Image: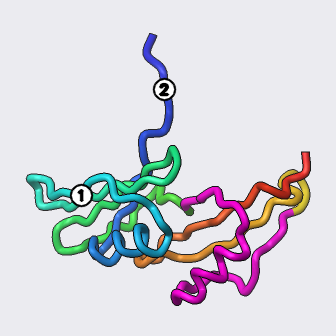
Amino acid sequence: MAKLTGLAHIGVCVSNMDRSVAFYQDVLGLALEKRFTMANGSELAFLRVGDCTIELICRPGGNVPSAPGQVDHICFDVCDIEPLVERLRAQGVSFLSESVSTMQGGLAGIKNIFLTGPDGERIEFFDQSGAKA
């Protein structure tokens, strides 16, 4: 019987492939697996971290569509979030808040912070090392 077996990748539309690959690879540390241009002129790049693959899509002319069903954010599991945030701030990355937050309630003890990628895509860092059972 046919069934879902996992999440293959998350596609993110970008306006400048070189800039976005540099951000995800050089700043966030994802590994570039492949990059190529499709017959229709769209550029694709697949970057990986752990079991997660991000597909960057740059359509001809750098047009980034704004459509219903837009993904709210991409979330990366991290460990030791504070030094990571400090390192990225030193590289000029801007975060949406001044400091890392510690969650309460059903996510008590988990630390997180949001930043934006080159095209305004929201990215969350999620440190579960302090989670309370």
Dot 1 falls on a residue whose secondary structure is strand
Residue displayed at 50% across by 69% down: 28
Tell me the quarter of the image containing the N terminus: top left
Q: Which residues are magenta?
A: 74-103
Q: Looking at the picture, which amino acid does disc 1 mark?
A: Arg
Q: Earlier in the sequence, mark 1 or mark 2?
A: 2
Give the camera-side residue of 65 and 128.
Answer: 128
- The residue where tag 1 is placed is 35
Of labels 1 and 2, the one closer to you: 1
The answer to whether 76 is drawn above or below residue 98 in the figure is above
Tell me the quarter of the image containing the C terminus: top right
Residue 56, by quadrant, is bottom left
Give the camera-side residue of 50 and 113.
Answer: 50
- The residue where tag 2 is placed is 4
The answer to whether 6 is drawn above or below residue 50 in the figure is above
Residue displayed at 47% across by 66% down: 29
The spot of residue 55 in percent (x, y) is 36, 55
